[in-house]
């Protein structure tokens, strides 16, 4: 497990939400 990958996932999700709104 690596917090780095979690950060990537969270950032990607943020971009998706930002793009959707």
Image (spheres, helix red, strand yellow):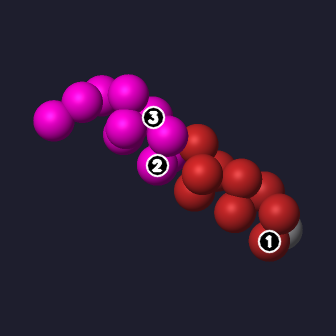
Determine if the magenta segment contains residue 3: yes
* Mark 3 or 1: the one toward you: 3
Left-right relation of 17 to 13: right
Q: Residue at position x 70%, y 62% from top?
A: 17
Question: Does the CB distance between marks 3 and 2 fall below 8 Å?
Answer: yes
Picture quarter containing residue 11? top right
Left-right relation of 7 to 21: left
Instruction: Give the residues drawn in magenta, as a range.
Output: 1-10
Q: Which residue is mark 1?
A: 20
Question: Could you tell which of marks 2 and 1 lies nearer the N-terminus?
Answer: 2
Question: Could you tell which of marks 3 and 1 lies nearer the N-terminus?
Answer: 3
5 vs 16, nearest the viewer: 5
Label 2 Cα crowd, 10 Å radius (few <14 / some 14-19 / many 20+): few
Q: Which residue is mark 3?
A: 7
Q: Position of residue 7 (x, y in %)?
A: 45, 34
Q: Which residue is mark 2?
A: 9
In this view, the residue farthest toward the bottom is: 20
Spatial CA span between label 3 and label 1 = 20 Å
Spatial CA span between label 2 and label 1 = 16 Å
Determine if the magenta segment contains residue 9: yes
Which of the numbered marks, if any, corresponds to residue 4?
Answer: none
């Amino acid at each position: 497990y690596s917090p780095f990958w979690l950060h990537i996932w969270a950032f990607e999700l943020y971009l998706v939400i930002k793009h959707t709104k």
